[in-house]
Image: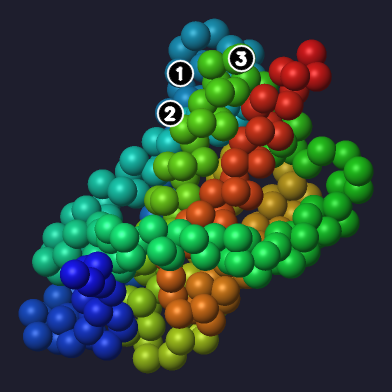
Amino acid sequence: MADPIIATSNTPSSIKARYAASGLSWWPVLMFLPARLAFAFLAQAMVVALAAALGSIDPWRQAAAWWPVYSTMTDILCLLSLVWLCRREGLTLIDLVGVRGRAALRQLAWTPAYLLAIAPAAVLASLVTQFFYGSALPPMIAIVDLPLAGALYSVVIWPVIWVVAEELVYLGYLLPRVEARLGKSWLAVLIVTFFWGLQHLAIPFIANGTYLLSRVLAASVAVGGITLVYVLWRRRLVPIIGAHYVFDLSTGFLVGLLPLLRG
């Protein structure tokens, strides 16, 4: 028996037809473009408020040091929003993934190939960061200061939830709907990449112009590469999630466990 393939409900053509037939408004889609940025600011602000209440003399910096931990709040808010957005179309989160069961496992086997395809964009993003900071650690890495429990969380839990939420938001939900609304794939790719890169202003937010510029530029290069590979390679979300997970796992190790291992 064939594995259930359910991607047809999430193609631009089927989305456009569904919106036209049911009279759904496009405004929730457009308003969701900057939602992850807003949720990231909100998550950090909540930790800032907690740090201030506990007597921190620099609550914003102390909060930013915990971004690999509190960023999960951003993911939870995004996933809850996606559940509602999908329900208004009669879909589920699995419909955004496009496959399930053995078909998903077969796609997951393509992760190494996708990892290699995305690697040039990751290298270029690293070069952008080095242009601004040379051999020094960039602020979003240097600022992290976690105890063992937080470090383990940044390696074991954070990357999993983060990559699933990001790919579902930008590639599973937003990209095909922006395509359906505009009718131009290249423009949808540019718009989604712009907002995906822009969200990194608040991951974490540090009030420094050089940092904010370098953060957004490097992130935009990286996620632009992810988006292009996704579009050009048959829009398979599962191996994209797998490849992105490898990169974010290395980030979690770098900011969490490596400082502890170095003593």
User: Do the numbered discs 3 and 1 sit on residues whose CB atoms are within 8 Å?
Assistant: no
Number of numbered labels in the structure image: 3
Q: Which mark is residue 166?
A: none
According to the image, label 2 marks what residue? Answer: 46
Spatial CA span between label 3 and label 2: 20 Å
- Dot placed on the residue nearer the N-terminal end, 3 or 2: 2
Callout 1: SS? helix
- Relative placement, left or right, of 26 versus 205 is left
Callout 3: SS? loop
Frontmost of labels 3 and 1 is 3
Query: In this view of the protein, can residue 197 be seen by the observer?
Result: no
User: Do the numbered discs 1 and 2 sit on residues whose CB atoms are within 8 Å?
Assistant: yes
According to the image, label 1 marks what residue? Answer: 50
Spatial CA span between label 1 and label 2: 6 Å
- Relative placement, left or right, of 35 versus 231 is left
Q: Amino acid at mark 3?
A: Pro
According to the image, label 3 marks what residue? Answer: 147
Residue at point 52% right, 41% down? 159
Residue at point 10% right, 80% down? 23
Q: Position of residue 130 (x, y in %)?
A: 86, 52
